[in-house]
Amino acid sequence: MNTTYRDIFKWGDKREQPVDKGTLDVIKEKFGFTDDDFSQKYITGEEQVALSKPVGINQNLLDKLIAIVGAGNVKTDDYARASHAYGKFYAELVKLRMGEIPSPPDAVVFPKSADEVTQIVSLCNEHGIALTPFGGHSSVTRGVETPNGGISLDLTKHLNKIIEVNSVNATVTVEAGMFGPAFENYLNSIGFTCGHFPQSFEYSTVGGWFAAKGAGQASTGYGKIEHMVLAVKVVTPAGVIETKCYPASAQGWDIHQIFAGSEGTLGVITEITMKVRRYTPQNTQYASFIFKNFESAVSAMRMVMQSGVGLPHLFRISDPEETEIAFKTKGFDDTLADRFLRVMGYKSGSRCLMFMAVDGSKGYAKQVKKSVKAICRKHGSFYTGAKPTLKWLDQRYSSAYLRDPLMDLGIMTDTLETAVMWDNLVNVWSSVRNYLKSRPKTVVMVHISHVYENGANLYFTFLSPMEKGNELNDYAEYHKGLVDTINASGGSLSHHHGVGRSLAPWMQQHLGVNSLGLMQAIKNYLDPKSIMNPGGTLGLK
Ligand SMILES: Cc1cc2nc3c(=O)[nH]c(=O)nc-3n(C[C@H](O)[C@H](O)[C@H](O)COP(=O)(O)OP(=O)(O)OC[C@H]3O[C@@H](n4cnc5c(N)ncnc54)[C@H](O)[C@@H]3O)c2cc1C
């Protein structure tokens, strides 16, 4: 039975994952750790959960909630409240390890239908109770925190079913609390795929994907989630909004798009209608390349996107440091193949890996791969075959499990991402890297993983020994400098993680007073008492 803080913060299925030898060797080399350091675990959060803040909702209101959803679907025990207090933002994980939960929700409620959600929203609105939608809680932006207490509305227990498939239109209507694997497995069984595979796929929900405006690993071909969603049903304090399904329309604004990236601040998304694509894994073509440097890899990638040769679905570049670490941890360093590549001029410290996979009909997939190969060859790449991409796909969700054991070793492990236009990509990459590297003993791995005709994202992963005893302040300062650097160099605040509360302080400066004012006006209309995910999410009041 789950009872400890560790049970709450651990990623995924909670199994204890050892750090592989390749990674331990890199940690020794980069941080000067010894075997002795590996034998000690740091702030592991193995204590029993105990909250100091009592339930702040009176029994009369709890009884009303119970009357709506049933007694088993309203929880006020410490573990339920604590396990709905945080997502997966780095500082949240540190706080859980320390047993710090100053603002848990007062109650966790599990609705069974959109009708029950409507009654709950109405009740909370009447009494001015904060209401925070809760999906897989994989938010890495402090999106599910409850600074004003109130109710955490967990959609995953009951609102997790397929409502309708329309195979003529190639659409599926699904309840918002359905997790990725159940959704995709069902679609595969009827010959379709959802095409959305965030690294958090196993433990995130369709509603959370749309609410946080995410991107899956195959977004270059399938699009971001907002490009896939055609219609929504949302329960707002002002009433229910149910948009109709069209391939496109010109009847004013696309209202469903207002809820893409709304992060629970406007209402509870209960249903989503999405495009689905034919599932033809037998046709998928895979390729990988190695380039002499980051600039030539980026240039080849841009040419692929702008040449009209078709779109890879998965399209990634690892920068030199990420490539170096991948080679080291996978035991490729100093092999015969490695020595051959070095002799050919693909030197460690500047070479970069590119992965590509393309779905579709057999002919299309082959044609795209052939064209990508030709473009990459022109940019001085060496073709390294399908295997590295297949290997990467095989472990595509597993690196998420590494974060907890690395934090056990006292290592700060976090990521941040941004979107940039092509003409500023290398500048943002080097400015942000320089900032991150200004911290001594920091490993900085960068990749591009969501690619467009006009630009791409940059995804920064950084690892550095924690400042023990000052973990939270140290991180807050470093994180602030990082976001400031991204902002100053012209990157977006986020490409796919959303804003939450962690990036909210930069919203006004980044968007401008009028744009944020427009968002606030929409919130004021739909949620005049500001009960929906209140406390600064998205920079809103
Ligand atoms: C290891 C790891 C890897 C990740 N990789 C990716 C990635 O590759 N791509 C990517 O896009 N993101 C990624 N993320 C971030 C996160 O998984 C996404 O933001 C995801 O879309 C959140 O879904 P969720 O169901 O967990 O939502 P939650 O974390 O539960 O909620 C996220 C936000 O949406 C709101 N919300 C949730 N459900 C609803 C609803 N039904 N109605 C209204 N509001 C709602 C919440 O209030 C909150 O503000 C990653 C996170 C982790 C921890």
Image (cartoon, grey):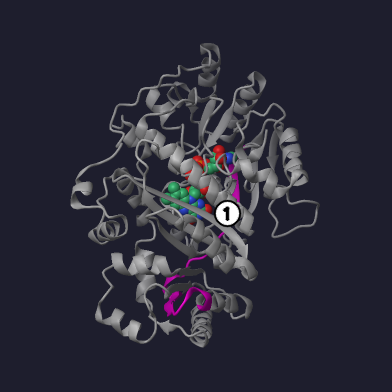
Q: Is residue 178 left or right of residue 326?
A: right
Which residue is at the front of the view, 310 or 316?
A: 316
Q: Is residue 80 above or below residue 375?
A: above
Image position of 338 with respect to 128: above or below? below
- 287 falls in the magenta region: yes
Does residue 7 appear in the picture of this structure?
Answer: yes
Q: Dot 1: few (<14), some (14–19), or many (≥20) neighbours within 10 Å?
A: some
Q: Quadrant of residue 126?
A: top right
Residue 68: x percent and y percent?
A: 54, 23
* x and y, in percent, of residue 99 in the image: 37, 29
Q: Dot 1 lies on which element?
A: helix
Q: Is residue 226 above or below residue 364?
A: above
- Does residue 526 lie above or below 297 as drawn? above
- Residue 53 in the image: state x and y as whole percent: 45, 19
Left or right for 525, reference 492: right
Residue 327 point in image, percent of width and height: 32, 70
Q: Does residue 494 show up?
A: no
Foreground of the two, 212 or 206? 212
Viewport quadrant of the C terminus: top right
The residue under label 1 is 485
Residue located at (41% from left, 19% from top): 52
**Who's the residue at 38% across and 78% down the image?**
347
**Residue 156 part of the magenta-drawn span:** no
Magenta-tinted stretch: 268-296
Is residue 358 left or right of 25 when viewed as pictured?
right
